[in-house]
Amino acid sequence: MIRLLALLPLVALVAGCAAFTLVEPQRQNVADVISVEPGMKWNRMTNSPYEGHVEVWTLDGPTLNTLVFFTGVPDGEPLFVPRLADKSKMEKPPVFRSTMNPLDVQELLHATVARFFQTTLAEERNLRVESIAGGRGFRFETRVVGRDEVERAGVFAGTVSNGKLYGAWFQGARLHYFERYLPEFDRIVASARLTGEAARK
């Protein structure tokens, strides 16, 4: 997602003044519901432009690559919305439903990105079943081209547990940042476990 956060002027301003905390390459707790073990140092955004049940990490800065964790999106809520947007002027966002199947979630991410980041192209493909956090999950690839005409490749992996959506979505510039760090994303996904309330049956 080389500049997914900069697809709107508003988001570009927020990204420019974002604060970060270091994430060490050891097991980490994400929002008390997801446990992962990164293989390199990341930076957690403490002033993310995303509003919702999300936590955002980056390796090289939010204009170069971004890892968005979905930390239990409940029924009836959107995946995310721009944090500083004027909610009174926003079109009602598409929302997650606990009855959604993987294809529905794929289409929901597409609608969310296309509508709120004003992309010139957003597509998802290669949906497949995959074990996530010890349970049945799914994975698909994404492609985003913003108004800056930079192509960003991405991948989403997630699962629905107790009616909530948990997952991770990594994006980077297709020609460099995505392929370089895809093995790190795969490591994080393979290490993922649901914890706390997310692990309750």
Image: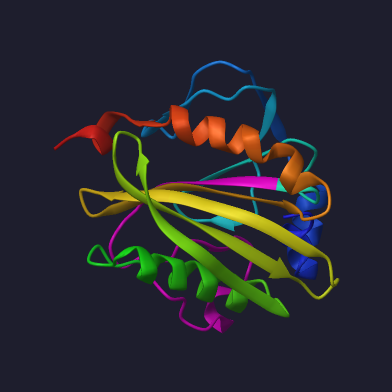
* 90 left or right of 180 in image: left
Residue 183, above or below 117:
above
Above-or-below relation of 190 to 83:
above
Q: Can residue 44 be seen in this view?
A: yes
**Residue drawn at the location 35% of the way across and 35% of the way down:** 133
Q: Which colour scheme is used?
A: rainbow
**In this rendering, would 83 be left or right of 64?**
left
Q: Is residue 45 visible?
A: no
Q: Is residue 67 magenta?
A: yes
Q: Residue 22 is drawn in which quadrant?
A: top right
Residue 80: in magenta span: yes
* Residue drawn at (41%, 49%) of the image: 158
Point out residue 14 in the picture as x, y percentages from the top left corner: 75, 55
Q: Which one is nearer the viewer's eye here, 18 or 124?
A: 124
Q: Nearer the viewer, residue 139 or 99?
A: 139
Horizontally, residue 154 falls left or right of residue 120, namely left
Residue 126's x, y, as percent? 50, 63
Could you say where residue 144 lies in the image, as x and y percent from the top left?
69, 68
Q: Magenta residues, as a range?
A: 66-95
Q: Position of residue 37 (x, y in %)?
A: 52, 23
Residue shown at 83% from the left, 47% from the top = 176
Residue 34 quadrant:
top left
Please indicate whether residue 151 sits to the left or right of residue 134 in the image: right
